[in-house]
Amino acid sequence: MEQREHQKAMIEAAMIATMTTIFVVGTFYIPLLSMLLVLIPVPFLVLAARRATRYAFFSFIITALLIGVLTGIIYSLFIFVIFGPMTMIMGSWIRRNKNPHEVIFAGAFASAAATFLLIYLISLISGIQLAVELGQVFESVLEQQAGSLQQLNIEPVAVEEVINYMLLIFPALIMVQALLGSFINYYLTIAVLRRSEAYREKLPEFSHFRLPGHVVMGSFLVLLLSWLTSYVESFNTEGMVANVVLLIVMIFFMQGISLISYWIKRTRVPKWFRILSLIILVLLSPIITLIALLGLMDSLADFRKLTS
C-alpha cells in the first residue's frame, strides 16, 4: 500500500513538473502569461499538502532543471530562488495545518529573503547594482518622453521625484509583492485542496482575516527604531523610515479591506458585487491610507469581535 502511494505521488510530481515547465516556456511566446508567474507555487503547494514536502521539492527541482535546459540557466535560477523557499515552507506548514497568518507571513518572509539574496548574488557576480540600473533606465525613458510630458503639462522634475521615491522604497516594494504573492497562493491552494475529498480543512474567509494582536505594538516599535536611526550618521534614515511606513500601511491595508469585506457581506449583496467592490477599492490608490487606518482601528478595537 505504501509503495503504491509512493508511485502515485511520484506520478503527480512528474505531471506537475511537466505542466509547470510548459507554462513557463509558454510565457516566452505569450508575454501576457507572465503576469501569472506569481501563481507558480500553487501546484507544488497542493502536492506538498496532499503527499509530502519531499515530493514537492523533487518536482520543483525537476521543473527548474527542465526550464534551465529549455530557456537557459538564468531564468531557471530566477524561478528556483524566488519561488523555491516560499513553496517549501508554505507547503510544509499547510500540511501541518499551521495558522493561516503564520503560513502567509512565513511564505512572504521566505520569498522576500530569497529575492534580496538573488539581487545580492547578481551584484556580487556581475558587479551590477540593480537599483542603479533601474534608475538609469527610468532616466533614459524620461529623457525620451520629455516632449510628451510637457504637452500633458507634467513637469519632468515631478516625474523624476516620483522615480527617486520609487527607487527609495524599492526594498519595501519587494516585501509587499512577496506578502501579496504569499497571500494569493495560500488562498488558491486551500481552494484547490478543498475540492479533494482527502482535505477537510475549512477555507479561511477573507472577511475574517485579522492580523495577530502583537502586530500593532511591533509595527510602532519598528517605526520608532527606524526614526531613532536619525541620530546615527551612517544610516539612511529617510530611506529606512519610508520603507517601514510603506510596509506598515500595506499590512494594515489588508486588514482594512478584510473589514470592509465583512461589512459588505453583512448586507447580503451578491458575491460578485462584493468582489468587484473590493477590487475597485484596491485600485483606488488615494484611499489606501484611509483603509489602512481603518485596519489599524480594527486591530485595536476588534469591530468584528473575532477574538471572542
Image (cartoon, grey):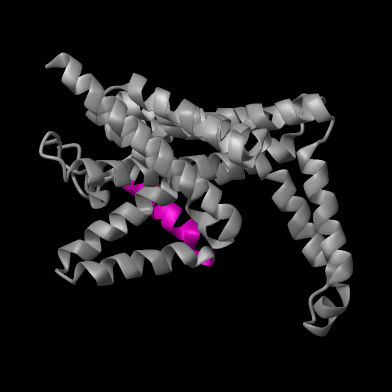
Estimate the x, y position of residue 12 in percent, counting from the top left: 29, 33
Q: In the figure, is residue 7 to the left or right of 214? A: left
The quarter of the displayed image where residue 3 is located: top left
Toward which corner of the image does residue 271 lie, by quadrant? Answer: bottom left
Residue 204 is covered by the magenta coloring: no
Q: Residue at x 53, y 44 (%)?
A: 176
Quadrant containing the C terminus in the rendered view: top left
Instruction: Name above or below for residue 13 compared with residue 6.
Output: below
Which region shows up in magenta?
286-298
Q: Position of residue 137 (x, y in %)?
A: 82, 54
Magenta: main secondary structure equals helix
Residue 38: x %, y % from top left: 48, 46
Q: Is residue 292 above or below residue 3?
A: below
Vertical order, 96 against 162 (above or below): above
Q: Nearer the viewer, residue 138 or 304?
A: 138
- Residue 26: x and y in percent read 52, 53
Q: Which residue is at the front of the view, 131 or 37?
A: 37
Q: In the image, what residue occupies the spot 51% across and 58% down?
A: 33
| Snapshot quadrant of residue 239 | top right
Compared to residue 7, the image places residue 76 above or below, namely below
What residue appears at the point 59 percent right and 58 percent down from the top-left corner? 29
Q: Is residue 109 visible?
A: no
Q: Residue furthest top?
A: 2
Q: Quadrant of the N terminus?
A: top left
Q: Is residue 117 visible?
A: yes
> What's the residue at 17%, 68% (across, down)?
267
